[in-house]
Image (cartoon, grey):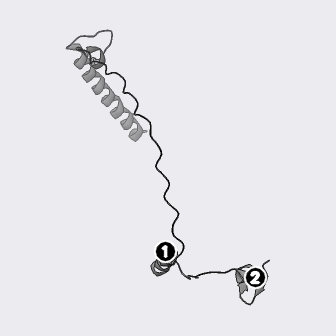
């Protein structure tokens, strides 16, 4: 428990202050800034670190002329006309199964 002299705690009563600002509003913040600016000068700014040379970039790899291996939809029955047809069938199959599952939930 703190010992007090009146309404001020004992350790606070012995402390020495240049200014006491009561309140934390914009006026109190302005007063605190002004009081801080009137005190001792700010310490000097630290020096910027010394930077070494920039790292060398890795060599550029040439893009292959044919990107078919990256963009083809590959499956066992691969064909230029068959690939889009299989994707369309898969899409409508997915939509049909989703509609059937939603209807089954409504009926059940």
Q: Which residue is mark 1?
A: 37
Quarter residue 13 falls in: bottom right
- Camera-nearest residue between 34 and 82: 34
Image point (31%, 14%), residue name: 74
Number of residue marks: 2
- Camera-nearest residue between 66 and 60: 60
> Quick one: label 1, few (<14), some, or many (20+) residues within 10 Å?
few
Image point (41%, 38%), residue name: 105
* Picture coordinates of residue 107, whole percent (x, y): 39, 39
In the displayed orientation, state which residue is furthest to the bottom.
6
Q: With respect to residue 96, does 78 lie above or below?
A: above
- Camera-nearest residue between 53 and 93: 53
* Picture coordinates of residue 5, whole percent (x, y): 76, 88
Image point (53%, 75%), residue name: 39
Q: Which residue is mark 2?
A: 10
- Horizontally, residue 81 falls left or right of residue 2, namely left
- Horizontally, residue 87 falls left or right of residue 12, namely left
| Sequence-earlier tag: 2 or 1 | 2
Looking at the rendering, in which quadrant would you find the N terminus?
Answer: bottom right
């Amino acid at each position: 428990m703190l010992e007090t002299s009146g309404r001020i705690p004992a350790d606070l009563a012995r402390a020495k202050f240049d200014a006491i600002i009561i309140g934390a509003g914009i006026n109190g913040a302005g007063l605190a800034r002004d009081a801080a600016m009137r005190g001792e000068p700010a310490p000097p700014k630290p020096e910027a670190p010394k930077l070494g040379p920039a790292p060398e970039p890795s060599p550029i790899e040439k893009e292959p002329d044919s990107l078919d291996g990256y963009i083809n939809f590959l499956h066992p029955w691969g064909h230029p006309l068959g690939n889009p047809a299989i994707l369309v069938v898969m899409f409508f199959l997915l939509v049909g199964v989703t509609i059937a599952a939603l209807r089954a939930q409504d009926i059940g």
